[in-house]
Image (tube, helix red, strand yellow):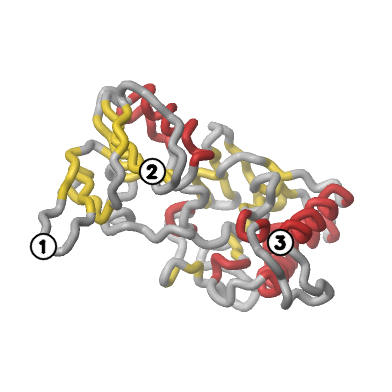
């Protein structure tokens, strides 16, 4: 069993990985090879100690080179859920794989897209974030898919293989996927509604106009990142951020968090420091 699993390949996750390696711990770093879209898109980074007016692209290249030198690989699987057991954690990915570790560090950043009304309350009752986890539950049914990235279109196709009808609400440009049972809806979703389970998706309407809605059996929210609260059941959060102590521990024993997901300021220096603290806290925790 691994000592730790780090979720997120931004500066907080990388800092935690480097520190865990220095402390001789076994771990996996989940993320993407491009590390962080937020960093890569930065025009200039002026306030990071030791780096003067570095571009986001150059910063990513430097981080990538450092990981390569340290022989730290990135596991490119999207985490679908983190489950706290008595003395360990089980991590499930959308690729259908599972991993076990003694501790977990959440360094998953913050969502660029806000949740819509009803999304949180209907989670597990018709709302899902994982196509490969829950797609089979909607065989022959009608679903809505709210997708924020072209890179997730393969998941839309996966859902279309099961569902009778897919209403696709793309929140990005350049939609390429085409299927007979996929209908694109170019409107902004406002609310997920129903009684015991999801029954409809409601759209925003101009002032004075009637709201429009779709009758659906389920709604899939496909985003690049999932909120920590949706990822880990029972995790305490406030205003979308994970509540942590000074040692970056959460309310769940053995689970730590670092970086933007713990709150403002959303700065690289803060994320690096918290990643380092979280890794040291993991080492202390593992000592008993």
Question: How packed is label 3: few (under 14 Cα within 10 Å), some, or many (20 or more)?
Answer: some
Question: How packed is label 1: few (under 14 Cα within 10 Å), some, or many (20 or more)?
Answer: few
Q: Position of residue 199 (x, y in %)?
A: 18, 43
Real-space CA distance between mark 3 and mark 2, rounded to the nearest whole angstrom: 27 Å
Q: Position of residue 155 (x, y in %)?
A: 46, 33
Q: Is residue 139 above or below residue 13?
A: above
Q: Earlier in the sequence, mark 2 or mark 1?
A: 2
Q: Residue at x 43, y 35 (%)?
A: 131
- Which dot marks residue 208? 1
Determine the image quadrant of residue 272. bottom right
Instruction: Please state which of residues 266 and 172 is positioned toward the viewer in this rendering.
Output: 172
Q: Earlier in the sequence, mark 3 or mark 2?
A: 3
Q: Secondary structure at mark 2?
A: strand
Q: Residue at x 30, y 44 (%)?
A: 186
Residue at the disc numbered 2 = 170
Q: Position of residue 150 (x, y in %)?
A: 49, 40
Q: Is residue 1 visible?
A: no
Is label 2 or label 1 in front?
1
Real-space CA distance between mark 2 and mark 1, rounded to the nearest whole angstrom: 25 Å
Q: Quadrant of the N terminus?
A: top right
Residue at the disc numbered 3 = 56
Instruction: Please state which of residues 204 and 155 is positioned toward the viewer in this rendering.
Output: 204
Q: Quadrant of the C terminus?
A: bottom right
Q: Secondary structure at mark 1?
A: loop
């Amino acid at each position: 069993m691994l000592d730790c699993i780090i979720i997120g390949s931004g500066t907080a996750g990388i800092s935690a990985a480097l520190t865990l390696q220095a402390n001789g711990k076994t771990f996996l770093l989940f993320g993407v090879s491009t590390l962080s879209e937020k960093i890569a898109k930065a025009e200039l980074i002026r306030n990071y100690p030791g780096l003067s007016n570095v571009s986001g692209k150059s910063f990513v290249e430097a981080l990538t080179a450092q990981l390569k030198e340290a022989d730290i690989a990135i596991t490119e699987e999207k985490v679908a859920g983190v489950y706290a057991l008595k003395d360990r954690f089980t991590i499930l990915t959308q690729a259908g794989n599972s991993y076990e570790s003694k501790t977990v560090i959440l360094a998953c950043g913050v969502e660029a897209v806000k949740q819509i009304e009803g999304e949180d309350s209907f989670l597990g009752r018709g709302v899902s974030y994982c196509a490969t986890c829950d797609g089979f539950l909607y065989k022959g049914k009608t679903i809505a898919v709210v997708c924020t990235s072209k890179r997730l279109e393969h998941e839309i196709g996966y859902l279309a293989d099961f569902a009778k009808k897919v209403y696709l609400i793309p929140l990005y440009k350049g939609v390429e996927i085409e299927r007979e049972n996929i209908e694109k809806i170019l409107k902004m979703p406002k609310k997920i509604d129903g009684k015991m389970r999801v029954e409809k998706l409601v759209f925003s309407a101009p002032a004075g106009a009637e709201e429009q809605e779709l009758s659906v059996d389920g709604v899939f929210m496909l985003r690049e990142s999932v909120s920590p609260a949706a990822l880990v059941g029972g995790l305490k959060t406030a205003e979308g951020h994970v509540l942590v102590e000074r040692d970056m521990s959460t309310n769940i024993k053995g689970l730590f968090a670092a970086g933007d997901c713990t709150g403002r300021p959303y700065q690289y220096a803060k994320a690096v420091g918290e990643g380092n603290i979280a890794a040291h806290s993991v080492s202390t925790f593992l000592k008993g």
